[in-house]
Image (tube, helix red, strand yellow):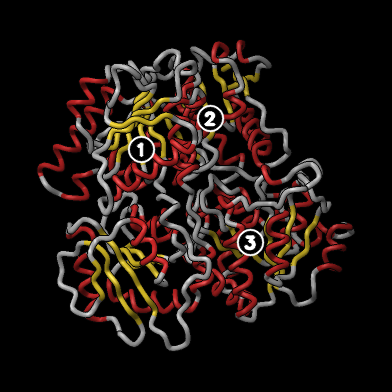
Amino acid sequence: MIPVYLCDGDGCGWAIDEDVRLTRAALERTGLVRFVKEPDEARVIHACWWEPLMRLPFERVRGRHVVCHMVGEPARCLAEPPFQAAMARVTHWIAQSAQAFEQLAWLAPSAGFGLSRIPYAVDVAEFASGPEADAGDPLAAALRERIPCGAYVVASFHRDTAAAGLGAAGGSKPSAKLIKGPDVLVEILARARELGAPVFALLAGPRRHWIREALRRREVPFAFVGELRAGDDLDVNVLPRRRIGTLYRAAHAHVCTSRSEGGPRAILEAAAAGLSQLSTPVGLAPDVLRPECVFRDAIEAAEKLARDARDGWLRRLAPVHAQSVRVEHTVDANVPRFAELYQGLGVSGPAARAPRAARPAGARERPRRVCLWNHFTPPPWGGGNQFMLALRGAMERAGVEVTVNGEDHERRPATAHILNSVQFEVDRFRAVVQPGGARVVHRIDGPISVLRGTPDSLEQDRLCFALNARYATATVIQSRHTLRFLTDMGFEPVRPALITNAPDPANFFPAAAPARPEHGEPLRIIASAWSPSPGKGAAIYQWLDEHLDPSRFRFTFVGNCPAVLRHARVVPPRPSRELGELLREHHVYLTASRNDPCSNALIEALCCGLPALYLDSGGHAEIVGAGGLPFTRPSEIPAALERLRDHLAVYRRLIQRPGIDAIARAYLDLALGEAPYRE
């Protein structure tokens, strides 16, 4: 028998605690383990979440197998310092969805951990019981009184409010927990009602303050099951699973609108309960739900929900989803999976780990002095240069002393260095910085060869990889797209962290009164690019120039385009302030660039409040999220533009981009912080 220390959950009685309960049950049934009370007695430390694991002193973990479930989307979690530290401690990750398995597989070669796929489990019996299970239940009776006759009930039990906005007395205004997409859910429910569906939201669980207020504003009726409290209600509104089962059985549908997820468990619970379902393509949703139940467009989701309210077309798929849960997502199904994992652990020592990047000593005591390495050029110039200028300004506002390109190094050496790919004087850097002498955060985009496809660009990639291996303490990757391509090329970035881009808010901000197409006025569309590379979309812009109806659409291009545009308004490259003003004069931004890892031009437009129509390539989809629409071929563009015109205000409200100050803090965590490097 293998002695195992199973870490606690989070003590909230919610998803993590349920994972611990079901994991314990599955491990017990393997007959391979015995649980011990102290980590020192164990051969395996097993955690269902990395935060309880990281509370253990490293001395109590050293030399043992450390198995941890992946909670959340791995790529997104790479921006969190506690997760970066956990990556160095865990010897074997358990992916609980196909998405998590794929993304952890990108990281496994460089991090040196083992990897298994063991799906989330759910206690099907708690949710699948028929109506007779609620006979005599006071909650079921109360729901029958509160839910209007003929209502189409949509269940939502996710937390939607950020804890930081909930004081004990509720004095501050609640803010949305945007990762859970409550703004998307509100738009879907409101639009479905506009389409005639008798939508009624059934809410439960803690921290539902934001969505209650938002639904009131949009006049969407709802019932909240729980204690109304102005401040944080985590201690009173976590419901037992039996009551959650009763709530599901009172509903017709469940909609998951998260922007990123590990699960969510709610998809399994709603499937077990036989509800109609819609979900964004997050976590385990594509594993469980049929493709027609997965959406990226909130307006499309509203239309599907309204149709289900009319004729139950989503409900016909519920038995398929329920069967998938019964077969793949139970304790019984996971017993042989855990047995296979533990049999492998039982015949080997702890997994070998890749060498960790050198950690300069004494960083905590040294000055907050950061050196940025980049060919700084006054705009208009390329996106990487624009970002580095914005990053410099944000760091200076944060009170950090910033130098550039090794200036004044002999007299005032930097505590940390931030490199922009290979866009700097490499020889100067090598002369100034010794490997291991200071923290080096290496920002990587591209891969350059994928963007440009030339022999010299492949050499630039090789130089980038060599610099990273020799100098980097941590690597900033700007998008999932880039991370996947880098690992496909065999590159193993040192301690990768996923941190996106943001522009200078002094130039790129929404208009106080956003432009709206008046009745009969053409929709104003704008595209921009500094580079004249064909990969930036010139052929598609030329198609638009030739095919768009000028009575419906007016197209402006700003920058350098190698194609001749005979009908469009073509504007030469403009400095940032003027570009921001031009963007705010338009209604929709269009980008046709291909394999663009993290388009700064696209981000600038979104930050000016423009919904985006984008070629479904590169990192565009993850940048835009719910704030726009994709296309795959030019012939799809006119219809997509009409859809954007019809629902322009909705897509504008769903734009969500982090600001440059938050991005700068993430860089500074890597450059000057301690949390990402904890043993």
Residue at mark 3 to residue at mark 1: CA–CA distance? 32 Å
627 above or below 555? above
Residue at the image point whose x is 45% and y is 20% from the top: 367
For label 2, the SS is helix
81 above or below 605? above
Residue at mark 3 to residue at mark 2: CA–CA distance? 32 Å
User: Which image quarter: residue 539?
Assistant: bottom left
Q: Nearer the viewer, mark 3 or mark 2?
A: 2
Pointer 2 residue: 82
* Residue type, label 3: His
Picture coordinates of residue 293, whole percent (x, y): 51, 64
Mark 1 crowdedness (10 Å alpha carbons): few <14, some 14-19, many ≥20: many
Mark 2 crowdedness (10 Å alpha carbons): few <14, some 14-19, many ≥20: some
Which is nearer the eye, 209 or 606? Answer: 606
Q: Along the horizontal axis of the image, is 536 left or right of 399? A: left
Q: Along the horizontal axis of the image, is 286 left or right of 539? A: right
* Residue type, label 1: Trp
Q: Along the horizontal axis of the image, is 367 left or right of 106? A: right
Pointer 3 residue: 254
Q: Are marks 2 and 1 in contact (CB under 8 Å)?
A: no
Pointer 1 residue: 106
Residue at the image point whose x is 27% and y is 69% from the top: 557
